[in-house]
């Protein structure tokens, strides 16, 4: 069990430090975002049977609220002298296999920008041998409409819903 916690901690540290530098290198260009839309760039950092780390960069014109239904929201403003807001969402999930109490999933979602951050973490017992049995995260395209709920995955059969308003 300690190995799983160490692996999860390492993944979070790598994601928060490494991904932030990569995100800051993306040049904002509002002309490539269709009107009334936001752009998503997904980086699959780790995907295995017992660990998943995804880093999602969201770009949209003006000030926007980024929300994961039931998990939290952050209001993101464009950087000074920019017309696009740049937000980041990090998804981390680890399946911890234990013999005494069954398997557990440790789950973290973080939404942040340059100045604010929101985290939602949970741990729950699950009946699964791999993360793919209970968690799917998928972004089907690069641009999505503003103000609409978009199902980006499922966790134990319940939809994970993203909206940018």
Image: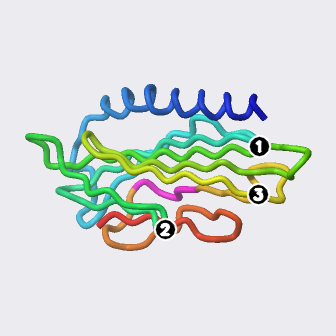
**Marks 3 and 1, Cα distance to the nearest angstrom?**
9 Å
**Marks 2 and 1, Cα distance to the nearest angstrom?**
23 Å
Q: Are marks 3 and 2 in contact (CB under 8 Å)?
A: no
* Residue 40 position in % (x across, y down): 40, 51
Q: Nearer the viewer, residue 43 or 94?
A: 94
* Residue 156 position in % (x across, y down): 70, 65
- Counting residues from the N terminus, which is met first, the one under dot 3 or under dot 1? 1
**Marks 3 and 2, Cα distance to the nearest angstrom?**
19 Å
Residue 125 tag number: 3
* Residue 86 position in % (x across, y down): 28, 45
- Counting residues from the N terminus, which is met first, the one under dot 2 or under dot 1? 2
76 sits left or right of 148 in the view: left
29 sits left or right of 102 in the view: left
* Residue 6 position in % (x across, y down): 67, 28
135 sits left or right of 159 in the view: right
- Majority SS type along the magenta span: loop
Element on which disc 1 rests: strand
- Counting residues from the N terminus, which is met first, the one under dot 3 or under dot 2? 2
| Residue, far right | 99
Q: Which residue is mark 1?
A: 96
């Amino acid at each position: 069990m300690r190995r799983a916690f160490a692996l999860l901690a390492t993944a979070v540290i790598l994601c928060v430090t490494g991904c932030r530098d990569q995100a800051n290198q993306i040049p904002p260009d509002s002309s490539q975002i269709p009107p009334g839309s936001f752009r998503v760039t997904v980086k699959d950092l780790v995907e295995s049977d017992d660990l998943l780390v995804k880093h999602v960069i969201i770009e949209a014109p003006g000030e926007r609220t980024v929300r994961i239904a039931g998990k939290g929201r952050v209001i993101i403003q464009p950087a000074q002298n920019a017309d696009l807001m740049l937000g980041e969402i990090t998804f981390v999930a680890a399946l911890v296999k234990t013999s005494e109490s069954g398997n557990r999933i440790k789950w973290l979602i973080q939404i942040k920008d340059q100045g604010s951050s929101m985290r939602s973490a949970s741990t729950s017992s699950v009946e699964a041998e791999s993360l793919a049995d209970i968690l799917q995260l998928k972004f089907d395209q690069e641009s999505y409409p503003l103000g609409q709920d978009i199902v980006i995955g499922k966790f134990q059969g319940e939809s994970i819903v993203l909206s940018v308003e």
